[in-house]
Image: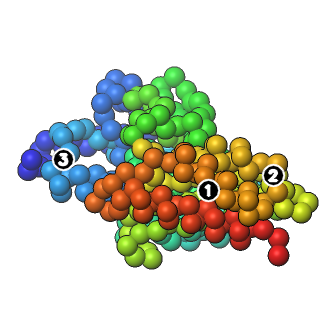
Amino acid sequence: MKPYLEDYAVINPDSEREVAEILADDPEVIPLAGGTDLFVSLKNGVLPPSAFLNMKSCPDFEKEPELTDSELILEPLTTISDVRYDEDANRFRLLYEACKNLSVISIQNLATWAGNVANASPCANGAAALMAYDATLELAGVEGTREVKLTQFYRGYKELKMEKEEYIRRIKVPRPEPGWKEYYRDVGPREYQAISKTLLAGRIQLGRGEEVNDVRLVAGSVYPHTLKLRQTEDYLRGRELTEETIDAACEKLQEEIQPVDDVRSNRQYRRRVTENMLREFLQESRPL
């Protein structure tokens, strides 16, 4: 389908209240911030005629990330670059690593964290890093705001636990406590500026010896949406991080993921490489 620009409308709200009212009146209107994925759909002729709500026209929305005593707050217009080059936000290592690996600098300057989450791509770099930090979404609408854990936000491929009249008002990322080891790696056709074939974000806290006190594991590109590896996490907690435990954790991983064959990779490769990343992370986390 050849796109015609007259088939698309852009609405420019003057206030946050107007944003909520427009979405309540017509839930089919699509909030638009960076628009990086929109350009791809438009070019490929797969974007149906639509109306978009230009979030950048709303003066109530901030752009810069804010670090408080308890959390990092990302606003609706906070871009990937805003976090990558912010000294305070760089304390969140997984977010910084996700920034470096997300496309090219021109895209990083446009793409927003809220858009990365709401677009619900299974290979979303930002969503995986945020989920590993137990991020919470503040959703807003005409009736007010509510909070949803990012780990509970995805219900299926491109299916969100968010009403059409709602939008992501803030992303709240708790400050990481000391004593955690962190890991982020994504694998693509190139080291940088490529869509991930698979990725893993992890955090682990060990007690005395090699016992796992707590752990967070999140995988991308191996399931219909960004996947928190709950079964693998549950297995690891309270166990000594021995080679036998690591082997068994890798078996749990294989039970959880559901990779597919597509133009970027195949399921067998994704299974093998994702297991290799988990094994690498856990082995590197063992005391010397």
Residue 105 or residue 242, whichever sits in front:
242
| Circle nearer the N terminus (1, 2) | 2
Task: Kindly identify which residue carries mark 1.
Answer: 250
Colour mapping: rainbow
The structure residue drawn at horizontal position 57% and vertical position 36%, both measured from the top left corner, is 152
Q: Distance between the residues labelled 1 and 3?
A: 38 Å
In the displayed structure image, the side of residue 136 where residue 155 appears, left or right: left
Task: Kindly identify which residue carries mark 3.
Answer: 46
Q: Which amino acid does label 1 sit on?
A: Cys
Q: Position of residue 19 (x, y in %)?
A: 41, 35
Q: How many labels does the image show?
A: 3
Rate crowding at label 3 as few (under 14), some (14 to 19) or many (20 or more) other CA atoms within 10 Å.
few
Q: Distance between the residues labelled 1 and 2?
A: 14 Å
| Circle nearer the N terminus (3, 2) | 3
Rate crowding at label 1 as few (under 14), some (14 to 19) or many (20 or more) other CA atoms within 10 Å.
many
Q: What residue type is labelled 3?
A: Val
Residue 179 or residue 270, whichever sits in front:
270
The structure residue drawn at horizontal position 61% and vertical position 62%, both measured from the top left corner, is 278
- Residues marked 3 and 2 touching at CB (< 8 Å): no
The structure residue drawn at horizontal position 13% and vertical position 41%, both measured from the top left corner, is 7
| Circle nearer the N terminus (1, 3) | 3
Q: What residue type is labelled 2?
A: Arg
- Residues marked 1 and 3 touching at CB (< 8 Å): no
| For discs 1 and 3, the disc positioned in front in the rendered view | 1
Tell me the number on the disc at residue 239.
2
In the displayed structure image, the side of residue 240 where residue 9 appears, left or right: left
Residue 6 or residue 269, whichever sits in front:
269
In the displayed structure image, the side of residue 32 where residue 192 appears, left or right: right
Position above or below: 208 against 235: below
- Residue 106 sits in which quadrant? bottom left
